[in-house]
Amino acid sequence: MRIAIDYTAAARQGAGIGRYARELIDAILGTASKHTFVLLTAVAGLSETWARAQRQLRETAANPAGLAFRDLPLTDEWMARLWQRLRLPLPAEWITGRVDVFYSPDFVLPPLQRRTRALLTVHDLSFLRHPETFPPKLSAYLNQAVPRSVARADHILADSEATRRDLLDLLHVPPTKVTTLHGGVTARFSPQAAHDERARLQAQYGIGARPYILAVGTVQPRKNYIRLMEACDPLAAQRALDLVIVGRPAWLSDPIVVAAEQRAYVHLMGFFADADLPALYRQAEALAFPSVYEGFGFPPLEAMACGAPVVASTASSVPEVVGDAGLLIDPLDVAAWTAALTQVLDDQALRAHLRQAGLARAATFTWTRTAQAWLDVVTTRISTT
């Protein structure tokens, strides 16, 4: 089959959906040798970064001769504006050439010719479950673009059973149209620490001189960071302890930033390069993941793969990822979070148990397995639709 993939999120977004798309597509290209792939990318402003990425993708591909690139001289914002907001009736096949399947890993589909089969990943429906955590303009866009793309798709991939249930309940998608496809974790997230990584964290980022609790994720209301700070306040008052929050400030983040600035023990670190994240996980006393809603939740999985104890939310998909390898706490119960974090900090037997359970749990999530499941969907669910 000739398969087109929208690679824009993978090329332009550092974390979250960008990482999901990069890791999945790399694994697909490395697994599938009998198909031809065309990567469609909005490349304006990427220059040498995109040239380097193309070289790496060719090295990854099991069949480099079957890999082609089609570049749009636009930013991702302009691509969304033209195809989603203005709904310019320019089929993607005018750029990719005729394809059997078009896959988008990022919520929305471009205009497509009727004969082209469409596969779409929907990561979550947080804009419907928790609209109060979105600015009105973004919420309005998602409420139009995502249901429209869901209706056009021949099949949909959901990051979790929780997202699959939301698609059925909120958008009334037929059950046979949705397949759950969990993400994976790469080998760089491992418990093997470099001998000097704690010192390097201190020298490069100014953290690690004191024990720290780690939180990873975009700074926005859904991540529940203000309650996490309130839960950590008693701990920081009683012991030498920092709270390190890694993630770019996004929409509606001002109250979170203000709350952090009022606490000397809280460090807002912004975006961290992928190469530095494993050390950050390994050296943490624990990962705290208090989100009120997640489509999947990579940070708990990555933390477990690095041997860090995990305290995570009971909300939406998070228990699917963590299982019984972490402590699961109601995201709205501040006192319960304080108690759980205290227990993890003080109980060495518990820490050892969570470490071993987390490593075993993380080992079951691999991108190779995810890529093979993706190919199975393409060959058994899409081509026969």
Image: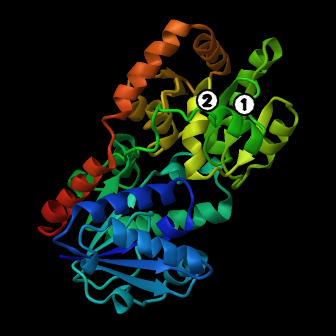
Q: Residue at x 39, y 70 (%)?
A: 57
Place of residue 132 in the rendered image (x, y in percent of width and height, measured from the top left): 64, 48
Image quadrant where one finds the C terminus: bottom left
Nearer to us in this view, 372 or 47: 47
Mark 1 crowd level (few <14, some 14–19, many ≥20, 10 Å Cα) = many
Which kind of residue does numbered mark 1 sit on? Gly
Q: Residue at x 26, y 88 (%)?
A: 98
Place of residue 380 in the rendered image (x, y in percent of width and height, measured from the top left): 13, 61
Which kind of residue does numbered mark 2 sit on? Gln
Question: In the picture, residue 338 is in which quadrant?
Answer: top right
Place of residue 94 in the rendered image (x, y in percent of width and height, measured from the top left): 36, 92
Image quadrant where one finds the N terminus: bottom left
Name above or below for residue 286 compared with residue 127. above
- For label 1, the residue is 208
Q: Is residue 174 visible?
A: no
Q: Residue at x 36, y 64 (%)?
A: 150
Mark 2 crowd level (few <14, some 14–19, many ≥20, 10 Å Cα) = many
- For label 2, the residue is 283
User: Which residue ends up furthest to the front in the rendered image?
Assistant: 195
Nearer to us in this view, 59 or 377: 59
Asked if the residue at tag 2 contacts the one at tag 1, i.e. Cβ–Cβ closer than 8 Å, the answer is yes
